[in-house]
Amino acid sequence: MHTSLAVLADIHGNSFALAAVLKALKLRGVSRLVNVGDTFYGPLDPGGTWDILKELDLSTVLGNQDRILLEDGPEWADVPVYQAALAALGNEGLSWLRSLPATRVLEGEILLCHGTPKSDMAYLLEDISTGLPAMRECADIHADIFPEANGCSLVLAGHSHHPGLVNCGDVTIVNPGSVGLPAYDDDAPPHIMASGSPHAKCAILTPGSGGWETEFVSVEYDWYAASDMAKANGREDWAQWLLTGMV
């Protein structure tokens, strides 16, 4: 394999950002794409996101918020954003989600996962014990990626929405950041993730003689439109995160 690879993550139904990222990648001549999950859920445009993605040849894995769309538990019955996502995706989109694995190995050397290979709810690169992300030690990262990453030179993960890269021995681990949501907070445990700008994020990986070369890409798009849509759908918090990339 000698071609560049674009990595998408955490689109969260932001069709505005997705369209801009795909246009930017096309201009760069990058046509090989992978997606490490959390594709649709959010107060934006899951249906429009599906309309874009179903036309692409895109190796994808399931994220935790993709998974909850499939579980459809009673706790979601009165959550408008959740019910709107189910309706927008319809049987076709949900069937596609059901077909996705939790992890995937491409060409014997690239491992895709959402959080870690063992859990779609865990952060691979970040320690959040202080409430802010800090890089984990390679020993801890190794414990989370092996044995699934045996024989792999590259591990691609998302979930944190926080761009990051680390070389641990012979393995490069990359989180491209979030296409669709540049910041958020969570309470399990309390922590924040913030990219610091409203740009859509992705990464381009190119194999070289010394390993994988990584370029993090920030793409302008109409984040005002995305923010207005989030606000109209009852998520003032998302509206602010989309506009600023800050919590």
Image (spheres, helix red, strand yellow):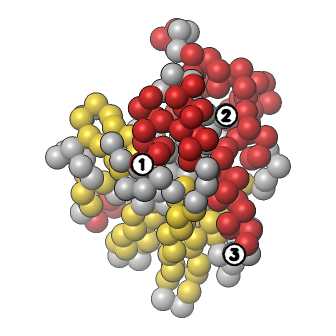
**Which residue is at a point 54% across and 91% down the rendered structure image?**
209
Q: Where is residue 37 in the image (x, y as percent from the top left)?
A: 57, 45
Q: Where is residue 83 in the image (x, y as percent from the top left)?
A: 62, 17
Name the quadrant containing residue 206: bottom right
Label 3 residue SS: loop
Identify the residue position indicated by label 2 in the image: 46
Q: Nearer the viewer, mark 1 or mark 2?
A: 1
Q: Is residue 170 above or below residue 46?
A: below
Label 1 residue SS: helix
Q: Residue 129, can we see it?
A: yes
Observer-nearest of 30 and 117: 30
Identify the residue position indicated by label 3 in the image: 28
Label 2 residue SS: helix
Quadrant where the N terminus is found in the figure:
bottom right
In the current view of this chain or complex, which residue is farthest to the bottom?
A: 209
Identify the residue position indicated by label 1 in the image: 244
Tell me the CA gap for discs 3 and 1. Answer: 26 Å
